[in-house]
Image (cartoon, helix red, strand yellow):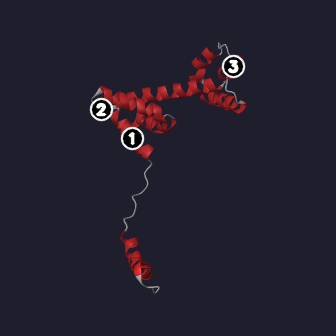
């Protein structure tokens, strides 16, 4: 049996055909569409849904924007001042307020985290937030958790002195 007999003998011929077609296949391949940040596109779509005539659709969009959280803040802030529909602007303001409240509450919870650095980071972020965090910090200052109570009182003092 010679080397070129049977299926193994066809390999060089098949390889030559494949290599001949390779340049054509490469140039014929469609160019991929430009990458679009799916989150940004989704945020834009959800913001437009805040103006939907159906309340369930508006509520669903608001809920999704809240879940997206910080990534939606910039677009919601822009919407509050620039959107043509006053109802959408108002709903964007409310969603933004809920996102900020959720963020504050998450940082408050971290004031008594097991890891020291998490507590420090939460304290720094709450101080940056400032006055909007006062109500939640006042509640935290009455916590049964010593660490949370101590850090909340220290933050209240720092924020109120500014």
Q: Is residue 70 visible?
A: yes
Mark with earlier residue (2, 1):
1
User: Could you say which is closer to the camera, residue 70 or residue 75?
Assistant: 70
- Disc 3 residue crowd, few under 14, some 14–19, many 20+, Cα 10 Å: few
- Disc 1 residue crowd, few under 14, some 14–19, many 20+, Cα 10 Å: some
Judged from the image, the secondary structure of the residue bearing numbered disc 2 is loop
Judged from the image, the secondary structure of the residue bearing numbered disc 3 is helix
Q: Is residue 86 visible?
A: no
Q: Position of residue 103 (x, y in %)?
A: 55, 28
Task: Determine the CA span between mark 2 and mark 3.
Answer: 44 Å
Task: Determine the CA span between mark 2 and mark 1.
Answer: 13 Å
Q: Are marks 2 and 3 in contact (CB under 8 Å)?
A: no
Judged from the image, the secondary structure of the residue bearing numbered disc 1 is helix
Q: Are marks 2 and 1 in contact (CB under 8 Å)?
A: no
Res. 18 image quadrant: bottom left
Q: Is residue 73 above or below residue 18?
A: above
Q: Position of residue 145 (x, y in %)?
A: 68, 16
The disc at residue 157 is 3
Q: Which residue is mark 1?
A: 44
Q: Which residue is mark 2?
A: 52
Judged left or right of residue 101, residue 76 is: left
Res. 9 image quadrant: bottom left
User: Could you say which is closer to the camera, residue 38 or residue 141?
Assistant: 38
Q: Position of residue 3 (x, y in %)?
A: 47, 85
- Disc 2 residue crowd, few under 14, some 14–19, many 20+, Cα 10 Å: some
């Amino acid at each position: 049996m010679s080397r070129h007999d049977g299926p193994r003998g066809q390999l060089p011929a098949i390889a030559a055909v494949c290599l001949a077609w390779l340049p054509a296949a490469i140039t014929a391949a469609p160019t991929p569409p430009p990458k679009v940040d799916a989150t940004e596109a989704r945020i834009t779509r959800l913001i437009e849904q805040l103006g939907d005539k159906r309340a369930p659709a508006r509520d669903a969009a608001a809920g999704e924007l809240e879940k997206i959280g910080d990534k939606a803040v910039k677009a919601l802030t822009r919407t509050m001042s620039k959107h043509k529909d006053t109802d959408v602007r108002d709903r964007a303001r409310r969603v933004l307020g809920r996102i900020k409240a959720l963020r504050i509450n998450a940082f408050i919870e971290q004031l008594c985290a097991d890891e020291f650095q998490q507590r420090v980071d939460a304290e720094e972020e709450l101080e940056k937030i400032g006055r909007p965090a006062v109500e939640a910090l006042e509640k935290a200052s009455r916590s049964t958790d010593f660490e949370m109570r101590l850090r909340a009182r220290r933050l209240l003092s720092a924020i109120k002195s500014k």
